[in-house]
Amino acid sequence: MPVYTRGEFNPDVSVGYLTKRIYQSALVGLEPIFVEEGISHLQWSALVSIWYDRGPTCRALAHDLGHDKGATTRLVDSLEERGFVARDRDADDRRVVNLVLTDKGRDIAERCMHGVVDRWNGWLDGWSTEDAGQFINHLQRLRTSLEASVGDDSCA
């Protein structure tokens, strides 16, 4: 049975519109955390992606961030110039360049993470742990469905 009908579909029930608005609102609310540290949300996202091994190479990082490889290379260049990231040739395949967080990069990523966690806990205040867990589970299921339907290499 379909979730939507054409006659009842509008922005207030559109998963796409709602997730976009939530993302935009969250960016506005999180930006002061990053400004205080002198980085952008995108830079922090890249640091976290590398930290959690979701973006161990420029190609993987581009995929995880949903950016093209050229823009991601410039992003990594800026993070490297600031001493947050180092490039390291792979020992098994010298053609592969791995991205590694420096101590400075991990420190700034972790400080921002603390602020992000606090902010999200504030926004989710009043939600039960069960409700929040179910919501996260539903988002993960939707992500899996979308990635399966558009292919794994859609952003790389």
Image: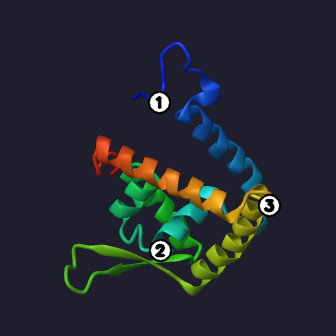
User: Residue drawn 68% across and 65% down?
Assistant: 129
Secondary structure at badge 2 equals loop
User: Residue drawn 30% across and 41% down?
Assistant: 149
Of labels 3 and 2, earlier in sequence is: 2
At label 2, which amino acid type do we have? Tyr
**Is 58 drawn above or below residue 135 in the view shown?**
below
Task: Identify the image's colour scheme: rainbow, by chain, secondary structure or one colour.
Answer: rainbow
At label 3, which amino acid type do we have? Gly
Of labels 3 and 1, earlier in sequence is: 1
Q: In the drawing, does residue 28 fall left or right of residue 7?
A: right
**Residue 84 drawn at (x, y percent):** 56, 76
User: Residue drawn 43% across and 52% down?
Assistant: 141
Q: Which residue position holds label 3?
A: 122
Foreground residue among 16 and 28: 16
**Is 83 drawn above or below residue 38 in the view shown?**
below
**Residue 56 drawn at (x, y percent):** 38, 72
Distance Cα–Cα, label 3 vs label 2: 24 Å
Q: Residues within 10 Å of mark 1 (few under 14, many from 20)?
A: few
- Marks 3, 2: nearer the viewer: 3
Number of the label disc, if any, that sits on residue 3: 1
Secondary structure at badge 1 equals loop
**Is 103 drawn above or below residue 79 in the view shown?**
below
Q: Is residue 71 visible?
A: no
Number of the label disc, if any, that sits on residue 81: none
Q: Which residue position holds label 2?
A: 52
**Residue 142 drawn at (x, y percent):** 44, 47
Secondary structure at badge 3 equals helix
User: Residue drawn 76% across and 68% down?
Assistant: 118
**Residue 135 drawn at (x, y percent):** 58, 53
Q: Residues within 10 Å of mark 2 (few under 14, many from 20)?
A: few
